Amino acid sequence: MKIRVGFGFDVHQLKDQHPFVVGGVTLEHHKGAFGHSDADVLLHAICDALLGAANLRDIGFHFKNTDDRWKGISSIVLLKETVELLTEKGWQVGNIDAMLCLEAPKINPHIPAMQENIAAAIGISTEEISIKATTNELMGFVGREEGVVAYAVCLIEKI
């Protein structure tokens, strides 16, 4: 069986009174991630990990932030499109391990819903999706709540 691993990273600026969507879940918070789509940093990192593992370039190549088709779109749609690209090349997702880095809000209560959203979009079990969160101990732009960061690794398998 042929397998590959991929790594993804994404960062978005946080703005006051802006929606905060993470893992397809809208979080209650006074700030939210800003971007061309819904700025779901977690799903963007996952898309980049998957695309990289399949040697299909990156999220910006496929979903340009200058293309109005993607303006304000749910990143769940981008994840589904990414999985379609992998499937066309004969790959399936094995598992995903992701990490969010932000000071607030608390992510732990929302992880099961995020896993459900991601599993449904990809077509795998929630058991294959790990989501963790940490703070930046009040240091840097993350610590000052100016931005949010996500990292993801994945395993894909040849069908």
Image (cartoon, rainbow, N blue to C red):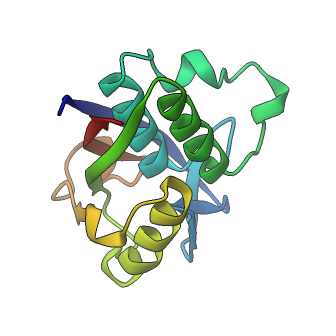
The residue shown at (28%, 49%) is 94
Tell me residue 68's x, y (percent): 84, 27
Q: Quadrant of residue 112?
A: bottom left
Q: Position of residue 86 (x, y in %)?
A: 47, 31
Camera-side residue: 102 or 57?
57
The quadrant the N terminus occupies is top left
Count the marks. Answer: 0
**In the rendered view of the protein, which quadrant contains the C terminus?**
top left
Q: Nearer the viewer, residue 134 or 57?
A: 57
Image position, residue 107 (x, y; %): 35, 73
70 on left or right of 150: right
In the displayed structure, would residue 44 be above or below residue 88?
below
Question: Residue 45, position in %: x, y?
Answer: 39, 40
Residue 41 in view: yes
* In this rendering, position of residue 61 left or right of residue 17: left
Q: Residue furthest bottom?
A: 109
